[in-house]
Image (cartoon, rainbow, N blue to C red):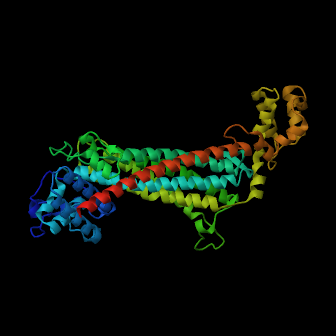
Amino acid sequence: MTDSEDTPEAGEADGETGGTAIRRDRFSGGPARGFMSSLAADERIFAADLQVDRAHVVMLAEQDIIDDEDASAILAALDDVEAAGHGELPDAEDVHEAIETAVIQRVGPEGGRMHTARSRNDEVATCIRYRLRSDLFEALETVVGAREQLLDAAADHTETVMPGFTHLQYAQPVTVAHWILSYEGPLARDTERLLAALDTTNQSPLGAAAFAGTPFDVDRERTAELLGFDSTVANSMDATSSRDFLVETTSALTTLATTLSGMAEDLVVYSGRDYLEISDDYASTSSIMPQKKNPDTLEIVRATAGEAQGALQRLLTTLKGLPRSYNIDLQEATPPAWTAVDAVPPALEVATGALTTAEWHEDVLADEAAAGFSTATGVADRLAMAGVPFRTAHEVVAAVAEDLEPGRDAPEIAELEAAAEEILGEPLTAYVDEETLAATLDPVESVAMRDSAGGPAPDAVADQIEGARGRLSADESAVADRRDAVAGALDGLESEVADYV
């Protein structure tokens, strides 16, 4: 994925002189060639390069920059190169040089016309965007699919009470559905970030040439249209030297991986506390302790966040301080993005699968929901709702909690009465009757009373699920519309190529 300002005569790429379509003998050997070569790694963009070549050749013919006969021969040769596959390409510095060399070997010197009015600089930038676009579609479809699974799981557990934590300490009772939705929300924002990255990526650099444009009468909008890009990157120097779209994609995937790491950690902790049992499909056993069932896949999901964060840091460090315009450092900018693209979506599938197939131990959850006097805040809220200043109500409940014996999850009403008498100077029943107070101490009732928007009460959770399904439907349509637009454009490119071949 490199470029050179040296342009040999097409006839020198005959394989007999040691040169290629780009490198003369002088530049074709030595240890540095292997050091600089990206041909093996470029297999990922082999198909993309062929499509970019086709669109460029069609445009050149339409603009009368090359004649139809040469276009036909080149396009037929590209089909032959594609059929042979990446493994049959001649040795070269990168896939772009190898394909051009292979075309010239099949067509003769006229095959070199395929590179008219472009550089490998705009070619590689276009290929990366083309391939990354496909990867982003796959990532987006994985995310929206995961969200749908989470919403279905949440709908099954709107009344399954469980303990909620802050600082890993028992805090307030919630529901399994409320906890699941706490992860669906970030995934919805991850969808927005990935859609934004897709739109940034889906702009064509082709036609910018090395960085300073070309004297040929090229039609950049036409090649963008043929390749399914939404628009062109307007400035030719920006088009070849910017890789911010890689940063945007890798950053979005790293944010997603960070969310997944939290989800995986929760599931590991809950598994250890017997709140749930991970399906055998997402667990393994010990090599020496046969009774063990380990949530190994989720531990790998946690590690994926580090892999993605490392990729993002590598990418940013590579791009930091590069002068305009093209520098071969940019060859090292794409592998970190591929790392994130390859690692994060599969981790999402595993984490979602582990969550949605887990068996929740509802009896254990119900017992644990009351642990550590987790309804204390609800009692203070109830007093405040009856007219006691919240800070005073907090003081009453705190006094009871401080004296609560270890192993007891909740105080008796008499203990609350005594604390209120001491702090308020009057009976607690002057504010709240015993029946209401007893209900407030029940985790199920405590959850039900917290019915504010976004809260854990079953009705509030049902509203959240309904809203989330609406957002999900809109996002599914947004992804599908973009994918359909690209597919339609590529069908058009195929039809145009067929007119020549």
Q: Is residue 480 above or below residue 291?
A: above
Question: Nearest the camera: 467 or 22?
Answer: 467
Residue 318 is left or right of residue 383, and the answer is: left
Q: Is residue 293 visible?
A: yes
Number of numbered discs overlaid on the protein picture:
0
Residue 229 % position (x, y) = 34, 48
Q: Is residue 323 visible?
A: no
Residue 297 is left or right of residue 409, and the answer is: left
Question: Nearest the camera: 126 or 69?
Answer: 69
Q: Is residue 155 above or below residue 417?
A: below
Question: Nearest the camera: 294 or 194?
Answer: 194
Question: Nearest the camera: 261 or 410?
Answer: 261
Which quadrant of the figure contains the N terminus? bottom left
Q: Which residue: 55% across, 61% down?
A: 350
Residue 281 is left or right of residue 330, and the answer is: right
Q: Which residue: 25% across, 52% down?
A: 123
Residue 280 % position (x, y) = 62, 68
Q: Which residue: 24% across, 68% down?
A: 89
Q: Is residue 356 above or below residue 209?
A: below
Q: Which residue: 49% across, 60% down?
A: 346
Which quadrant of the figure contains the C terminus? bottom left
Q: Quadrant of residue 37?
A: bottom left
Residue 193 % position (x, y) = 47, 44
Residue 94 % position (x, y) = 24, 60
